[in-house]
Image: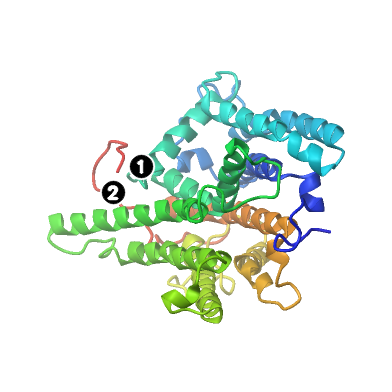
């Protein structure tokens, strides 16, 4: 069984089989496969994802592989060395704690391979896709966002995905920190205080901070446009962007309070908070963040009418919308329920029988995996919603109306500038 880190200092059984660096690598590779599946299924439903992402068209559609096939090829390229590295690691370590710690350079080497494939200009391996990805990543890394028509949706989609990978990114930092620390090992028991007690929480907060700044930029664009036009335009006064920014801001109290609870060296009495008070504040913070995020997923990102009366007189199924591209209504209801459950995985810590579940390395990995899976499901419906907003016909049902609150805003600039 997995061991509680507060009780057992040695490696737990799960970490002997799948050390932290391999868990990070596995989720990254699965994410690439998942993106290929997103592109594949959406193309089958006649949703043009490359068009929505402002991706350059194929030079020769007859000879160039479709975008989902390129994603699958990249995923295969990443999967083969991962499988070989894992087999070699298991053959050499035999789940012996001493050997597991000794051979930590094997998973770290694979992580370097991943970085090389993504960042080095290797022309044979989806170079156009990686170039586009790196360009977008560079722009959003400081919270920038392109203008409508120049890749804005791509920026939003990637930044939202990064929020689901926040803990994976933090674990990547922990792995590298432990590897380069003179008295540590990347395959030892994960030290999530490596580098200082505040570094890992800051790393976790960065993706939410990126989206927060993007929302503020969009609000400022709307405000400036209204000032130039001498009144409130069709896109309102920008309150929807402030409301979206508040959603991402609500993640910060959760991160801070979680860090305070885990920092046992801090005397909470000195700051006027007991352990019980911290827990109650954390509970309020996670409840607010989880249910606000769930509401936004359903009502704003997916434009479903579960929480509001439909603005269109066109008949449609309860809680959904007039235009649906996926084959059955049950898929949407399943997604709503699944999103709610996975948004509330924090509740595992509330049960007296599962109080330490998230302290097990296997439990942490499972929750990270479930969050990435939730985001994979979310992408299908978010992209479908964007397609409905950008088209006037097709799909199941009658044409839908533009979303006044969340429609793209264009300041009239044509350049794909960074903010």
Q: Residue at 53%, 80% (x, y): give it.
A: 280
**Quadrant assignment, res 109:** top right
- Which of the numbered marks, if any, corresponds to residue 149? 1
Residue 209 image position (x, y, % from top left): 41, 54
Q: How crowded is mark 1: few (under 14 residues within 10 Å), some or many (20 or more)?
A: some
Residue 285 image position (x, y, % from top left): 49, 73
Name the foreground residue: 138 vs 3: 3
Residue 246 image position (x, y, % from top left): 39, 66
Quarter holding the N terminus is bottom right
**Quadrant assignment, res 236:** bottom left
Image: 402 above or below 356: above
The answer to whether mark 1 and mark 2 are in CB contact below 8 A is yes
Mark 1 or mark 2, which has the lower sequence index?
Answer: 1
Name the foreground residue: 373 vs 166: 166
Q: Is residue 151 visible?
A: no
Q: Can residue 243 be seen in this view?
A: yes
Residue tagged 2: 410
Q: How far apart are marks 1 and 2 (CA)?
A: 8 Å
Residue 308 image position (x, y, % from top left): 47, 76
Image: 78 above or below 398: above
Q: How crowded is mark 2: few (under 14 residues within 10 Å), some or many (20 or more)?
A: some
Give the residue furthest to the top: 123
Dot 2: element: loop
Name the foreground residue: 367 vs 340: 367
Describe residue 227's horizontal placement relative to residue 175 as left or right.
left
């Amino acid at each position: 069984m997995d061991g509680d880190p507060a009780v057992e200092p040695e490696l737990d059984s799960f970490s002997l089989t799948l050390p932290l660096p391999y868990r990070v690598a596995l989720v990254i590779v699965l994410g690439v496969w998942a993106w290929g599946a997103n592109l594949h299924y959406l193309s089958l439903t006649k949703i043009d994802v490359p068009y929505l992402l402002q991706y350059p068209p194929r030079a020769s559609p007859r000879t160039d592989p479709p975008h989902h096939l390129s994603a699958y090829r990249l995923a295969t390229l990443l999967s083969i060395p991962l499988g070989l590295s894992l087999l070699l690691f298991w053959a050499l370590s035999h789940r012996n704690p001493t050997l597991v710690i000794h051979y930590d350079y094997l998973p770290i080497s694979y992580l370097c391979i991943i970085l090389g494939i993504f960042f080095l200009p290797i022309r044979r391996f989806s170079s156009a896709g990686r170039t586009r990805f790196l360009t977008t990543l560079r722009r959003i890394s400081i919270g920038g966002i392109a203008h409508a028509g120049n890749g804005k949706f791509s920026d939003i989609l990637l930044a939202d995905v990064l929020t689901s990978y926040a803990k994976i990114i933090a674990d990547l930092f922990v792995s590298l920190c432990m590897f380069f620390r003179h008295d540590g090992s990347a395959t030892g028991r994960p030290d999530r205080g490596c580098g200082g007690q505040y570094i890992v929480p800051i790393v976790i907060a960065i993706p939410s901070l990126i989206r927060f700044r993007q929302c503020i930029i969009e609000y400022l664009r709307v405000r400036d446009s209204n000032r130039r036009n001498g009144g409130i335009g069709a896109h309102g006064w920008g309150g929807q962007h402030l409301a979206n920014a508040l959603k991402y801001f609500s993640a910060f109290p959760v991160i801070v309070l979680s860090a305070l609870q885990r920092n046992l060296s801090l005397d909470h009495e000195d700051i006027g908070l007991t352990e019980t008070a911290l827990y109650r504040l954390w509970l309020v913070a996670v409840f607010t963040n989880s249910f606000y995020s769930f509401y936004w997923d359903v009502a704003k990102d997916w434009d479903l009418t579960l929480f509001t009366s439909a603005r269109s007189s066109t008949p449609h199924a309860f809680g959904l919308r007039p235009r649906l591209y996926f084959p059955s209504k049950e898929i949407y209801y399943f997604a709503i329920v699944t999103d709610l459950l996975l948004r509330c995985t924090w509740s595992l810590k509330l049960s007296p029988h599962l109080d330490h579940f998230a302290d097990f390395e296997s439990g942490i990995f499972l929750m990270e995996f479930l969050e990435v899976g939730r985001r994979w499901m979310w992408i299908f419906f978010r992209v479908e919603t964007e397609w409905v907003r950008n088209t006037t016909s097709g799909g199941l049902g009658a044409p839908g109306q533009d979303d006044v609150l969340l429609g793209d805003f264009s300041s009239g600039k044509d350049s794909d500038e960074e903010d």
